[in-house]
């Protein structure tokens, strides 16, 4: 007990100020989310009412029922999960191979190639949307999930390669040399030894991709028009444009769409922050 | 014998390198490099839907830089980036420093404060659009109760500008906080103890030790977030669609809308190329900064 106390700061007035300020920012962070949640659980009559009803008089799940079963939102949700999973797998595989080749195959100008690959990820995506639209129409890939996977993968792979490149470099060469002496080929070393011990880096990289794809709006908005291919962000946006706004249902849809990402974040917070910060600082 | 083996090995290695790097090269060339070349070509043409009709040289660029409409968008971009940065950086550094103090519930507070950052721009825009709704918004209501004025946050030009910046700050300031927290871990505790012995108070220590020690991180965050804000479309597009009366239309929003809302892909492409070139300039600064870190 005593040791715990001495670990904490002892400046009492300063602590009070710190708590007050942090509590204020914590409230600011969650207030819109809580208000959205409250709105989504209200009976229709309480959604648009003045003065606003802070807490629903009774819990009403009509909005959630309508979003999940009376609209196409379930389809959008499934599509988002599908595209996200495929992108995570494909992008991680492609990036891991590239990163390993660049760290261990003694490629001439390997460092420069890595730098070049990373630079391409700094080309702003807004600038690529129009030409990609023109190209995809010409090659008949417009309005396909395949195109979405292609674009997300191409745009995320350079950053993932960079993260894994840093990760592979930290693996002691001795392990691989020992395996080599024992008769393992380079590919065997990669699949059987390097990949399994790099789990940490791979998880960070995978999280980074999944958040990117799950949260994207521009790519899915620009390259799909078919209901059956739509993903959640565009699904949410469509609540705004169709016959006014049903705020109760829209907020229910918002809550449904953020649950997976919040669960992921709360469970894997450290990995999350590591991966995202690495991605942010370097690109 | 030994010689032939190493030669074969080397050949094999080269094959393997090609195989391992091939997919990423194909993707980058097809989805990033070719499109930027096509964007450049398209920007020199008059267009109809997805077809280029007539070569017009730099006409599309002239229409950006020689019209007041173009300049309004450029100024909107500058204002959006600068004001967001001016708020986000002190906020991120300040709250980060507070969160670094050893207090109870620190983990919980950190999780909650970082939360907005994992939400998409679409969700951030929609949540605040509802909070600030002109009729039934929670914030709108309270502000009316306190000041007696009902502000239309989304549909009046001045307020809309402030609104998109505010939503952007809410959504993105935690990344500065995270970078700050990481940087603070690298400051040796002895420096603070020495300062305390010398009688320096909290504010004095913050200004004379913390800020100088994490300055490289702050610089990185400024540049990184500037690029991010400059290229930002989704948040503004979902919240105001560039309106009212183009008040929130930045160059990036304009590039997107010219292409996908109005089908002017020629002008849209020239906006894209302008954005691309400005990003290169930003990136050069960014790389210089990162390199100076490595040397330090």
Image (cartoon, coloured by chain):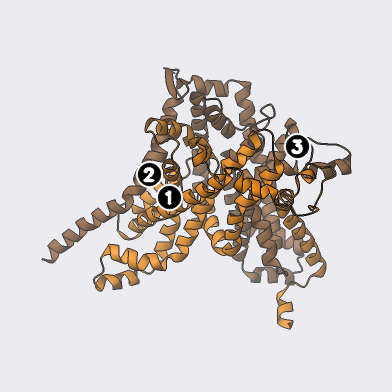
Chain colours: A orange, B brown
Residue B23 left/right relative to B127: left
Residue B26 left/right relative to A157: left
Callout 2: 10 Å neighbours few (<14), some, many (20+)?
some
Whether residue B37 is visible = no
Q: Residue B149: x and y, percent?
A: 86, 37
Residues tagged 3 and 1 counted as in contact (Cβ below 8 A): no
At x 45% / y 57%, what residue is drawn? A163
Residue situated in front as seen by the camera: B74 or B52: B52
Q: CA distance from mark 3 to mark 1?
A: 39 Å
Residue situated in front as seen by the camera: A6 or B296: A6
Residue B59 left/right relative to A168: right
Which label belongs to residue A157? 1
Q: CA distance from mark 2 to mark 1?
A: 9 Å
Q: Residue A228: x and y, percent?
A: 50, 40
Residues tagged 2 and 1 counted as in contact (Cβ below 8 A): yes
Which residue, given by chain and number where applicable, does mark 3 sit on? B153
Q: Secondary structure at mark 1?
A: helix
Q: Secondary structure at mark 3?
A: loop
Which residue, given by chain and number where applicable, does mark 2 sit on? B27
Residue A54 left/right relative to B182: right
Callout 1: 10 Å neighbours few (<14), some, many (20+)?
many
Residue situated in front as seen by the camera: A18 or B242: B242
Whether residue A98 is visible = yes
């Amino acid at each position: 007990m005593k040791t715990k106390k001495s670990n904490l700061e002892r400046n009492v007035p300063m602590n009070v100020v710190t708590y007050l300020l942090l509590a204020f920012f914590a409230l600011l962070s969650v207030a819109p989310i809580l208000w959205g949640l409250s709105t989504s659980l209200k009976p229709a009559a309480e959604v648009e009412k003045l003065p606003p009803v802070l807490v629903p008089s009774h819990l009403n799940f009509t909005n959630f029922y309508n979003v999940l079963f009376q609209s196409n939102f379930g389809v959008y949700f499934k599509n988002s999960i599908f595209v996200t999973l495929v992108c995570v797998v494909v992008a991680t595989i492609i990036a891991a191979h590239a990163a390993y080749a660049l760290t261990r195959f003694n490629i001439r100008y390997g460092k420069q190639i890595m730098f070049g690959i990373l630079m391409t990820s700094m080309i702003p995506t807004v600038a690529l949307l129009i030409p990609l639209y023109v190209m995809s129409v010409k090659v008949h890939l417009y309005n396909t999930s395949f195109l979405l996977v292609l674009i997300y993968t191409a745009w995320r792979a350079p950053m993932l390669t960079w993260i894994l490149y840093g990760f592979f470099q930290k693996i002691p060469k001795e392990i691989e040399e020992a395996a080599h002496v024992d008769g393992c080929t380079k590919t065997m070393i990669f699949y059987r030894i390097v990949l399994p011990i790099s789990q940490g880096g791979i998880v960070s990289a995978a999280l980074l991709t999944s958040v990117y794809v799950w949260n994207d709006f521009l790519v899915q908005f620009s390259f799909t028009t078919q209901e059956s291919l739509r993903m959640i962000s565009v699904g949410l946006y469509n609540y705004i444009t169709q016959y006014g706004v049903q705020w109760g249902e829209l907020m229910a849809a918002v809550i449904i769409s953020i649950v997976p990402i919040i669960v992921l974040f709360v469970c894997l917070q450290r990995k999350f922050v590591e991966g995202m910060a690495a991605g942010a600082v370097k690109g | 014998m030994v010689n032939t083996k190493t030669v074969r090995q080397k050949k094999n290695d080269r094959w393997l390198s090609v195989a391992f790097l091939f997919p990423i090269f194909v993707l980058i060339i097809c989805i990033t490099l070719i499109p930027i070349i096509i964007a450049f070509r398209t920007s020199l043409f008059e267009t109809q839907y997805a077809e280029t009709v007539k070569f017009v040289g730099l006409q599309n660029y002239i229409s950006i830089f020689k019209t007041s409409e173009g300049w309004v968008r450029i100024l909107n971009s500058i204002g959006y980036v600068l004001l967001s940065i001016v708020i986000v950086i002190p906020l991120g550094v300040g709250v980060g420093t507070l969160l670094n103090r050893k207090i109870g519930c620190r983990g919980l507070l950190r999780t909650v404060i970082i939360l907005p950052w994992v939400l998409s721009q679409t969700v951030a825009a929609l949540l605040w659009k509802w909070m600030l709704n002109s009729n039934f918004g929670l914030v709108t209501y309270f502000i009316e109760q306190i000041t007696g004025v009902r502000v239309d946050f989304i549909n009046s030009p001045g307020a809309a500008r402030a609104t998109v910046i505010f939503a952007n700050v809410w959504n993105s300031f935690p990344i500065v906080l995270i970078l700050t927290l990481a940087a603070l871990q690298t400051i040796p505790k002895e420096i603070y103890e020495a300062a305390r012995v010398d009688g320096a108070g909290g504010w004095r220590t913050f200004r004379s030790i913390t800020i100088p020690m994490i300055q490289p991180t702050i610089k990185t965050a400024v540049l990184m977030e500037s690029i991010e804000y400059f290229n930002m479309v989704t948040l503004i597009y979902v919240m105001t669609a560039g309106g009212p009366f183009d008040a929130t239309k930045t160059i990036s929003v304009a590039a997107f809308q010219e292409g996908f809302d109005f089908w002017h892909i020629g002008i849209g492409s020239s906006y894209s190329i302008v954005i691309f070139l400005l990003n290169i300039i930003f990136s050069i600064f960014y790389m210089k900064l990162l390199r100076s870190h490595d040397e330090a």
